[in-house]
Structure formats: structure tokens, C-alpha cells
Image (tube, helix red, strand yellow):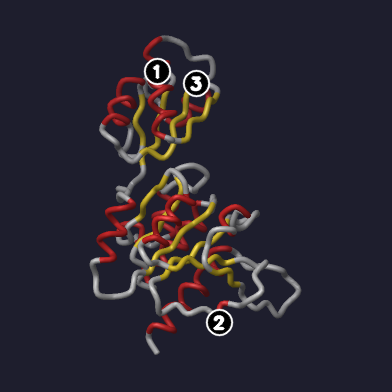
Amino acid sequence: MENEQKIYGIRAVMEALNAEQPINKIFVQKGLKGELFKELESTVRKSGISLSYVPIEKLNRLTRNNHQGVVAQISPVQFHNFEELVEQVLSKEEAPFFLMLDGVSDVRNFGAIIRTAECCGVHGIIIPKNGAAPITDDTVKTSAGAAFNVPIAKVDHLKDAIFYLQSSGIVVTGATEKAEDDIYGVDFNQPTAIIMGSEEKGISPSTLNIIDHQAKLPLMGKIGSLNVSVACGVFLYEVVRQRNK
């Protein structure tokens, strides 16, 4: 192990997978063969962890040690079990307050969002295993350490997580400029989950179809949208405002 954020070598990465370590991504040398590699590849696919096939030069830049063609990046924070997190929050006296991210891929935007979520008292952040920004050193730095304070849960499918929240009495509101109603007409005093979309595409259409409310921010200028971390901050603080009247 070169530092606490990387594991290298096929067997070491296999052990990390079997121990359910919080792995962000695995880099594998192009053309790598052998039975042990096939076993690793199968395990990675079952886990849902992102796998990238790269030239050996990329691996050599990640570590100077004998990587055997495999390097894994480890998240600096531990992820929470989604269902256990929801049940834990539901057991509290205060109304649940969750944040869901649908495809936010920039690590600095993610870090800024985590920082704001912590300041707003968000009970947990829910992200998909695939297509989401990893938690890296940059994420933690941008979050000002808030990544260690806000529970973050990874789920296989965001839509399944939405259904689970709804069945638990939590109302899911999506931030989208396509909405007819603005944010100020939504009642956030009830159990709430806010979902923010990706920087480029926003919330996926299939996800928009199953949420309870869609809401937009009023925009007075010529620019059609805000940076996702800024928009997220406005949404989260509207929840805070309503709940502290």
C-alpha cells in the first residue's frame, strides 16, 4: 500500500473486495489475462464498482510499486447501509431530511454539496454506485471535512431507493428547470428527500416520472441554470427556512 487511498496487486484488491472495503474505482491493465484476473473481474462486476481498463503507463503513474496490473482507489470515508440509515433517521423525533444525487460526477461539486448538506442538517446523502463522483481527497478537502460528518449511502439503483423512501412516508422532490412550480410552493415541513441531477443532464426522465414533486428556482437573468452545488444550497436552505419559522 503506497498510501491509505490506494491498494495494488490482484490478491490485495481481491481481499479488499471480499472485506467490502469502500472502493471507489479499480484500474486494470489492458490485456491482462489469467485465472486470478478472471476471478477478480467477475467479483468486481458483481460488486458494481467502476472498472477501467488502462495502459500500464497509467498504473505506473498511480503507484511506483509492483501493482501486477491492478490498482484500486479507496474512499477515505466509510459508506452507510441505505436501509439501516433510513430506519435510523425514521426513529428520530425530527422530520427526516435526505439528499439524493442523480449523476453528479464532479468531485469538487460533490464536496461543496456535502459541505452545504452538513451545514443544513441533512440526515443522509444517497448516491448511486455507478455514475456518481467518487469521494477522493479533493472531495474531502472541498467539503471542509464535512464528508466525515454526513452519512453517505451508495445504492444499486436510485429509483429503487426512491420507492423505498416513498414507502417509508418520505416525500421526494426533484430540482429541475422543467418544473411548472417553483421551490417556494413546496411544503418541506414533512419528511423530505431532495434530489439533484447531474451537471449536464439534470435528473433522468425516468426518475422524474416517479418522484412526488418537481420544483424549480426562479431565474431572473439570461443564464438558464445554476451550478448544481449552488442550486442544491438554495434548495437545502429553503428546507431549513421553512422548518425554522
Dot 2 and dot 1 residues touching (CB under 8 Å): no
| Residue at point 45%, 50% (across, down) | 160
Question: Residue at the front extreme?
Answer: 167
| Residue on which disc 3 sits | 29
Q: Secondary structure at mark 1?
A: loop
Q: Position of residue 142 (x, y in %)?
A: 44, 59
Q: Secondary structure at mark 3?
A: strand
Figure quadrant of residue 146 = bottom left
| Residue at point 38%, 69% (across, down) | 97
Give the alpha-carbon distance from disc 2 to disc 1, as whole Å: 57 Å
Mark 3 and mark 1 lie on one chain; the one further toward the N terminus is 3
Q: Position of residue 230 (x, y in %)?
A: 55, 69
Say whether residue 183 is left or right of residue 71. Answer: right
Q: Quadrant of the N terminus?
A: top left
Mark 2, residues whose alpha carbon is within 10 Å: few (<14), some, or many (≥20)?
A: few
Give the alpha-carbon distance from disc 3 to disc 1, as whole Å: 9 Å
| Residue at point 36%, 44% (across, down) | 75
Which dot marks residue 68? 1
Figure quadrant of residue 231 = bottom right
Query: Which of the two marks, 2 or 1, is nearer to us in this view?
Result: 2
Which dot marks residue 185? 2
Q: Secondary structure at mark 2?
A: helix
Q: Quadrant of the C terminus?
A: bottom left
Count up the numbered dots: 3
Query: Which is nearer the eye, 151 or 203?
Result: 203
Amino acid type, residue under disc 3 in the picture: Gln
Which dot marks residue 78? none
